[in-house]
Amino acid sequence: MNDTKVTDSILYIGADDKTIDLFESQYVVPNGISYNSYVILDEKVAVMDTVDARKTDEWLANLDSALGGRDVDYLVVSHMEPDHASNIQALAEKFPGMQVVGNAKTFSMISQFFDIDLTGRSMTVKEGDSLSLGSHTLTFYMAPMVHWPEVMVTYESSEKVFFSADGFGKFGALDTEEDWACEARRYYFNIVGKYGARCRHSLRRRRPWTSRSSARCTAPF
Ligand SMILES: [Fe+2]
């Protein structure tokens, strides 16, 4: 597993996949890819996205290690594409008290992917809504069509950490030594470039991570 610490309380629990030959069954990924998921440890515990079903066991082991016996209070779903979201049901079943955090479009899509009843367990957020975990505060911003309609990004303001969904992704497993810009560019114009206007719109709006502050981004740099 890669270095697990984004900060002392925000841990990477994702997984590299170096056995996949074609991402989304069409893009060559000679250095694999990473499925990025994080846990935030505070008075409340939040998990930021899950991973692809190809890496469920490794992800659950990483999660258990990070939790140290604690329960998960919230799962934030930034994107319903399977490489982010395949384990929503598994996590909901593992932690029956966990709330699933998403926007209205997220919840209209979850029922199309999973046979799961989230009655009383769903927290629907909209642009600018915040969720306090204790000392950490998550604020949610909608980023529709970057690159599915339900996509949203999250900014954690106490440590200035930005959870960017697909927005600044790249091909390549995290431990790969390669030219970052080349594979990020190839990811962008294959995966989200079709929605370039939406990406520009999202970046140009006055939002915390677009300021000159020192926000850290959880995309796999
Ligand atoms: Fe995506």
Image (cartoon, rainbow, N blue to C red):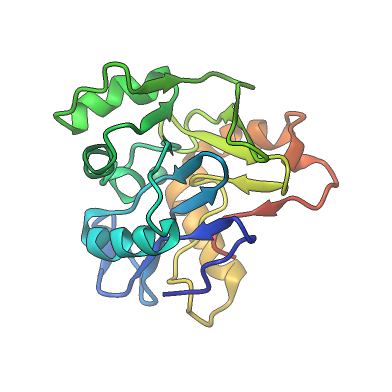
Could you say which is closer to the camera, residue 175 or residue 59? 59
Residue 213 appears left or right of 151: right
User: Dividing the image into four equal quarters, which quarter contains ligand 1?
Assistant: top left
Q: At 24% from the left edge and 44% from the top edge, which residue is drawn?
A: 94
Residue 113 appears left or right of 64: left
Residue 174: x percent and y percent?
48, 72
Q: At 44% from the left edge and 70% from the top edge, which residue is drawn?
A: 172
Q: Quarter-wise, where is residue 49 in the image? A: top left
User: Is any atom of residue 3 visible in this view?
Assistant: yes
User: Is any atom of residue 149 visible in this view?
Assistant: no
Residue 8: x percent and y percent?
63, 61
Q: At 50% from the left edge and 28% from the top edge, which residue is drawn?
A: 144
Residue 147: x percent and y percent?
45, 38
Could you say which is closer to the camera, residue 190 or residue 100? 100
Q: Quarter-wise, where is residue 142 in the image? A: top right
Residue found at the far left of this picture:
115
Could you say which is closer to the camera, residue 95 or residue 209? 95
Name the image quarter holding the N terminus.
bottom left
Q: At 53% from the left edge and 82% from the top edge, which residue is drawn?
A: 177
Residue found at the far bottom of this picture:
177
Q: Is residue 84 above or below residue 153?
A: below
Q: Is residue 47 above or below residue 62?
A: above
Q: Is residue 147 above or below residue 84?
A: above
Residue found at the far front of this picture:
69
Residue 132: x percent and y percent?
61, 31
Name the image quarter holding the C terminus.
bottom right
